[in-house]
Image (tube, rainbow, N blue to C red):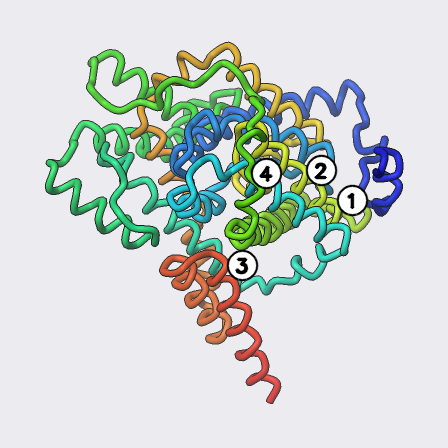
Amino acid sequence: MICKRELVATLPNNLLPRRHDYRLDRKTFSKDLIAGVTVAVVALPLALGFGITSGASAAAGLTTAIIAGFLAAIFGGSKYQVSGPTGAMTVILLPIIHSYGINAIPFLGLIAGAMVILMAILRLGRIINRVPWSVVEGFTAGIAFVIALQQLPLVFGIKKGEGERSLVVAWHTIKNAFSLGINWTSISIVVLTLAVKFTYPALARRLKIGFHVPASFVAIVISLGVVQIFSLKINTIGNIPRNVGTWQGKTIIASDVTHLLWPAFLIAILCAIESLLSARVADGMVHTTTQEQYHPNRELFGQGIATAAASLFGGLPATGAIARSSVNVRAHAQTRMAAMLHAAVLLFVALLAAPLVGHIPAAAIAGVLLGTSYRILNPRSLKESLQTTKGEATVLVVTAVATLAIDLIWGIGIGIVLYAVVHFKKKN
């Protein structure tokens, strides 16, 4: 049997945390604290929403953000990455939970986490990191549409329609909404949330508000206030247990290995690709020097640990999150301590403010996630990308359509093959 010291010795040195990664001084800590609180305010509704959308629960989403967010910050390879539940992961988890049940998650997360750690040990980070940018943009656009479609049950205040593919589920959900009668109260709260989310930043600048409050947080507070003041009958997030990290490993059954290997592989591939993409985007925003750039293999190592641990303790598989990492950079985070503090703030919310959070309207969460999908889509950037070469634009569109119509992994695979064909024709 291998002891802990021997196991650590077998790992490449560049995968392990280093003392200088956690430098603490008053100046950097104060900036990291502000960034951590800011990201936590943004991450809270996203974690709750993605937990619900995945077919698990709001509590599972919050647990994921806390455990995975903290561990990925410690062991990951990026100074600015913030990890947790993401829209892309919900796209994969939704049909898996539908087919195998929520009890499959601990085993799935453990296997997927081990696969991602193995990728790190085999130094596959730089290979995965070379996915063509047109494929990445198409993949991101496809995810944005899928996230938007996933919100339809919350928008209409009904259960999701039958089916596994996003388009099929969306179609059945819309049909059910019309047959049951349109829930105008729920739709109104979605519209209110979106209106506040997109108008508040400009209003804050006009009023010269000196401190930053995320628009998503303001939108949820206002929507919650309207529901409470007018006593509107509307679905809420519901009860959130005041505990984090409940051991779920007892549900693991050895006989499940064979039929869960492929779903676990899909989760591992998505975890690797999205995490490296997010870290790459964060570094690009900061214009980091070569020495300070993130380490792909160490990032995979950290994400593998985070996914396994979160899944075993009541959460879900996680990845690096582009939206939260971007907020972290814009909030002037200095070190990985900001991401660790973001997890600590979310833990504080889970332990002390769970009853209040449980009253948040589900429609408000849908509004926040619809706004998030729009930000992820980034129409202006998408328009510019489509105006590049015809080949690059074709790769982007086909990847997005395949991601939306089939699934994420097929979307990436088809995009890479098409990219290779297009560039092969160019050379010849």
Q: Is residue 414 above or below residue 63?
A: below
Gap between marks 1 and 3 measured at Cα: 23 Å
Tell me if I can see residue 374 in this picture: no
Q: Is residue 87 above or below residue 340?
A: below
The residue that label 1 is drawn on is 292
**Label for residue 136?**
3
Say which amino acid is labelled 3.
Answer: Val
Pointer 4 or 3: first along the chain: 3
- Residue 50 at x, y = what percent? 44, 36
- Residue 92 at x, y = what percent? 46, 48
Q: Secondary structure at mark 3?
A: helix
Q: Secondary structure at mark 4?
A: helix
Gap between marks 3 and 2 measured at Cα: 22 Å
Q: Are marks 1 and 2 in contact (CB under 8 Å)?
A: yes
Task: Tell me if 209 is positioned left or right of 14 in this view.
Answer: left
Pointer 4 or 1: first along the chain: 1
Q: Residue at x 60, y 25 (%)?
A: 342
Tell me if I can see residue 175 in this picture: yes
- Residue 8 at x, y = what percent? 85, 38
The residue that label 2 is drawn on is 79
Say which amino acid is labelled 2.
Answer: Lys
Task: Tell me if 197 is positioned left or right of 23 in this view.
Answer: left
Say which amino acid is labelled 1.
Answer: Glu
Q: Secondary structure at mark 2?
A: loop
Gap between marks 4 and 1 measured at Cα: 16 Å
Pointer 3 or 2: first along the chain: 2
Task: Tell me if 326 is positioned left or right of 225 in this view.
Answer: right
**Label for residue 325?**
4
For the residue pair 302 and 100, the one nearer the viewer reads as: 100
